[in-house]
Image (cartoon, rainbow, N blue to C red):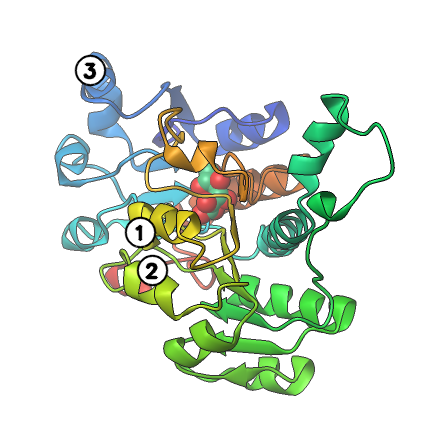
């Protein structure tokens, strides 16, 4: 008999078949308490769990005594209680490499659209406002040769630095726990403390994961330190930003604009004041959302689960120590 796994996200047909070749798969729509209750036996017997975006906490794990590995279709795993997984010796696998280039592309899209007001002016064209030659009220600000400040220099940060340096001639500053020789040598990047980055960067780009240390890292004091011409970009996690402080800084002209792919609450509520500000580009968490990348992430996550349940955790494992 094949081992049982729970799948809580739709997969492309070929990947679903790949999973089914190894496991007996129970597909569920989510990990809500009533879903768990309705499928109690399947959850009780499952050795694997595959999906994304749902909360995986101690209460859920208590219903899954046979669980040995979880596999998330994402690089971020802030929705997992890693201590609870460690206590129960359950492996956590993720997809750190599959989305790097695509998220870096999204960051450039946010930078370009915020600085050049792409969304705003395109909407004005559609509204019939382009009736004569355009004047300064349609102008944006330059991107090329401006200073980019990258907060969180992991794989995505490196891919962004590469685009900024080679594509746009931008000096690169970064703040990270450690210096990255690769960034310094290849992109002439400069490691600096957060205050220096906030004061000097024209684009402050957050690619931080959500942890106890990063929650609300960007608040009133941080926005006050930025240039009034600075553009704030976030494609990491929304809760890294105190959104009320960001709104206040944008309204007060403390910073010039913001390009955001992630928010404190997702989906972004229609009542959010961010949606009323013309100098905000708000995207629906599309960082990795291309057909190619989402396929590669799902394929990696399927392979990760197969590998983990076969004891192969050389790559993509968050907590190899529990094996
Ligand atoms: C996904 C992400 O959109 O990988 C991540 O951490 O934020 C995104 O790529 C999301 O997790 C849904 O799979």
How far apart marks 1 and 2 lie (CA) works out to 8 Å
Describe residue 44's horizontal placement relative to residue 301 as left or right.
left
* Up/down of 20 relative to 250, above or below: above
The quadrant the C terminus occupies is bottom left
Q: Nearer the viewer, residue 248 or 76?
A: 248
Res. 286 visible in picture: yes
Q: Secondary structure at mark 3?
A: helix
What is the x, y in percent for residue 52? 41, 36
Disc number for residue 218: 2
Q: Earlier in the sequence, mark 1 or mark 2?
A: 2
Callout 1 touching callout 2 (CB < 8 Å): yes
Displayed quadrant of residue 226? bottom left
Q: Residue at the location (39% across, 26% down)?
A: 8
What is the x, y in percent for residue 293? 63, 43
Mark 3 lies on residue: 34
What is the x, y in percent for residue 133? 87, 38
Q: Residue at the location (77% across, 66% down)?
A: 167
Q: Secondary structure at mark 2?
A: loop
Mark 1 lies on residue: 245
Describe residue 104's horizontal placement relative to residue 55 as left or right.
right
Q: Earlier in the sequence, mark 2 or mark 3?
A: 3
Callout 1 touching callout 3 (CB < 8 Å): no
* Up/down of 44 relative to 301, above or below: above
Mark 3 Cα shell of 10 Å, populated few (<14), some (14-19), many (≥20):
few
- In the image, is the residue at mark 2 within 8 Å of ligand 1 by its beta carbon? no
Q: Earlier in the sequence, mark 1 or mark 3?
A: 3
Q: Secondary structure at mark 1?
A: helix
Q: Nearer the viewer, residue 281 or 182?
A: 281
Q: Residue at the location (45% across, 55% down)?
A: 253
């Amino acid at each position: 008999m094949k081992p049982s796994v729970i799948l809580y996200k739709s997969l492309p047909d070929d990947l679903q078949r790949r999973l089914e070749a190894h496991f007996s798969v129970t597909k569920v729509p989510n990990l809500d308490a009533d879903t768990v209750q309705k499928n109690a036996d399947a959850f009780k017997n499952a050795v694997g769990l595959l999906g994304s975006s749902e909360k995986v906490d101690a209460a859920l794990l208590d219903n899954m005594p046979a669980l040995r590995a979880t596999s998330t279709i994402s690089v971020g795993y802030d929705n997992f209680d890693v201590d609870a997984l460690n206590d129960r010796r359950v492996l956590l696998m993720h997809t750190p490499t599959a989305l790097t280039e695509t998220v870096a592309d999204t960051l450039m899209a946010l930078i370009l659209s915020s600085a050049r007001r792409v969304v705003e002016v395109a909407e004005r064209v559609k509204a019939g406002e382009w009736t004569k030659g355009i004047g300064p009220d349609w102008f944006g600000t330059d991107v090329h040769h401006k200073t980019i400040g990258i907060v969180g220099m992991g794989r995505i940060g490196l891919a962004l630095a590469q685009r900024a340096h080679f594509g746009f001639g931008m000096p690169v500053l970064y703040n990270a726990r450690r210096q990255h020789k690769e960034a310094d040598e290849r992109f002439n990047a400069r490691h600096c403390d957060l205050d220096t980055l906030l004061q000097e960067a024209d684009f402050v780009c957050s690619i931080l994961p959500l942890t106890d240390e990063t929650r609300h890292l960007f608040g009133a004091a941080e926005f006050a330190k930025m240039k009034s011409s600075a553009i704030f970009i976030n494609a990491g996690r929304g809760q890294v930003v105190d959104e009320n402080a960001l709104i206040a800084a944008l309204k007060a002209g403390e910073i010039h604009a913001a390009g955001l792919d992630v928010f404190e609450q997702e989906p972004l509520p229609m009542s959010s004041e961010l949606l009323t500000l013309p100098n905000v580009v708000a995207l629906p968490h599309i960082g990795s959302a291309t057909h190619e990348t989402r396929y590669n992430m799902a394929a990696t996550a399927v392979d990760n689960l197969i590998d983990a349940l076969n004891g192969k955790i050389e790559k993509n494992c968050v907590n190899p120590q529990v094996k």
